[in-house]
Amino acid sequence: EYGSLRITVTDEEGAPLSGVAIAPSGASRRGYEWSGQAAHQGVETNRAGVGRLSGLAAGVRSLEFVMDGYFLPGEFKTTVAAETELSLSVKLRKGATVAGVLVVPPGHAPADAQVLLRDWALRPARIGADGRFTFAGVAPGQYLVTASAPGLVCVAPVTVAVAEDGTPPAEIT
């Protein structure tokens, strides 16, 4: 038995957020039942900040919300009811920006490297030609910044902390 969720996503002031990716936690992992393709792949919110997940197996589900510059404090769980569409509202918070400069040896391009903020997102940072990188929307907490590039050995990861008030750490080099 399956149900659906109609989710309105806004910022802290109540303005709708367009382009927020919504998916059941672990959607790419086994263990979830789906009756339709839409729920398996997740959805993005429209201009009104609304996204609809359908074909979700009835029961308790955890959802993930991803948008550069924002985060959802804590975990979001809801109960999907069979043959029912449940309307929900979610507020995302603006997060801090963690930024730095990746230094590579002569003859290597910074854009060939990958910088990750571990324990936050599986997306690598965008790296400019000058080696500058940023992670936007980082929630308060402590993270490891790691870098890798073909043919190069990375120095030890750097630990950064984002304060509860959203104050970002100093720039990382």
Image (cartoon, rainbow, N blue to C red):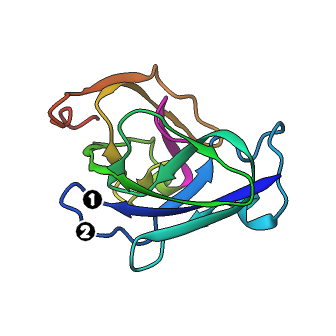
The x and y percentages for residue 131 are 37, 51
Classify mark 1: residues with Cα within 10 Å, few (<14), some (14-19) or many (20+): some
Choose between 145 and 161: the one closer to the eye: 161
The x and y percentages for residue 155 are 47, 23
Q: Which residue lies furthest to the bottom in this view?
A: 47
Disc 1: which residue: 11
Asked if the magenta segment contains residue 114, the reply would be: yes
Amino acid at pointer 1: Asp
Question: Magenta residues?
Answer: 112-122
Disc 2: which residue: 15
Q: Which residue is painted at 40% across and 72% down in the image?
A: 18
SS assignment at label 1: loop
Q: How many marks?
A: 2
| Left or right, residue 116 beside residue 11 | right
Q: Residue 32 carries which label?
A: none
Task: Find residue 32 and report its image quarter.
Answer: top right
Task: Find residue 151 and report its image quarter.
Answer: top right
Q: Which residue is painted at 40% across and 71% down in the image?
A: 49
Answer whether residue 26 is visible to the viewer in this image. Answer: no
Choose between 126 and 52: the one closer to the eye: 52
Asked if the magenta segment contains residue 94, the reply would be: no
Mark 2–mark 1 CB contact (< 8 Å)? yes
The x and y percentages for residue 48 are 39, 77
The x and y percentages for residue 77 are 53, 38
Q: In this view, does 141 lie above or below 13?
A: above
Q: Which residue is painted at 55% across and 57% down in the image?
A: 22
Choose between 94 and 89: the one closer to the eye: 89
Choose between 158 and 105: the one closer to the eye: 158
SS assignment at label 2: loop
